[in-house]
Image (cartoon, rainbow, N blue to C red):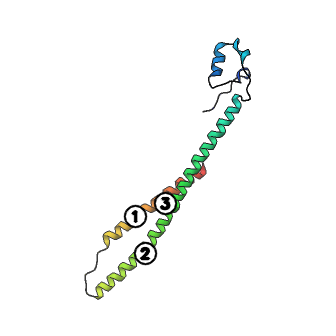
Amino acid sequence: MPVIPIPRRVRSFHGPHTTCLHSACGPVRTTHLVRTKYNNFDIYLKSRWMYGFIRFLLYFSCSLFTSILWVALSILFCLQYLGIRIFLRFQYKLSVILLLLGRRRVDFSLMNELLIYGIHVTMLLVGGLGWCFMVFVDM
């Protein structure tokens, strides 16, 4: 919340409500104001700097957290992709061996569908978190 500048004669004060008290009392009490080394503009700059610093920390930590999640999901996506390729080769070799032995083939259709749905959800999360990461970087 920005601080509204106060006229020069009422700038030195001891607390946040002292200026209201001085302005309510009128010009009689203005001679008793004590000068301090701080004025409203200094406090305004300090609060503005602190607000900017806290906002920067918030955006930076959100961006860092999102980028870490994005990297983790990207690694998970690559592992799922390689795992599916290895699992499909295993299925193929197992099916061929079972056919050569005269046994019935094992049905992997439910497992394949679950793996494909999992990699699809991971891909959507990677895309969404990448977008969020770019939004935080852009801020």
Q: In this figure, which residue is indicated by the disc labeled 2?
A: 85
Asked whether 29 or 126 is in front, the reply is 29
Q: In this figure, which residue is indicated by the disc labeled 1?
A: 118
Compared to residue 65, the image places residue 78 above or below, namely below
Asked whether 17 or 49 is in front, the reply is 17
In the figure, residue 36 lies in which quadrant? top right
Secondary structure under badge 1? helix
Q: Residue at x 56, y 54 (%)?
A: 64
Q: CA distance from mark 3 to mark 2?
A: 20 Å
Three-letter code for the amino acid on which mark 3 is drawn: Val
The quadrant in which the N terminus is found is: top right
Compared to residue 124, the image places residue 21 above or below, namely above
The numbered dot on residue 55 is none
At label 3, counting other C-alpha atoms closer than 10 Å, the crowd grade (few under 14, some 14-19, many 20 or more) is many
Mark before the other along the chain sequence, 1 or 3: 1
The numbered dot on residue 126 is 3
Three-letter code for the amino acid on which mark 2 is drawn: Arg
In the figure, residue 84 lies in which quadrant? bottom left
Asked whether 107 or 61 is in front, the reply is 61
Mark before the other along the chain sequence, 1 or 2: 2
Q: Position of residue 48 (x, y in %)?
A: 65, 37
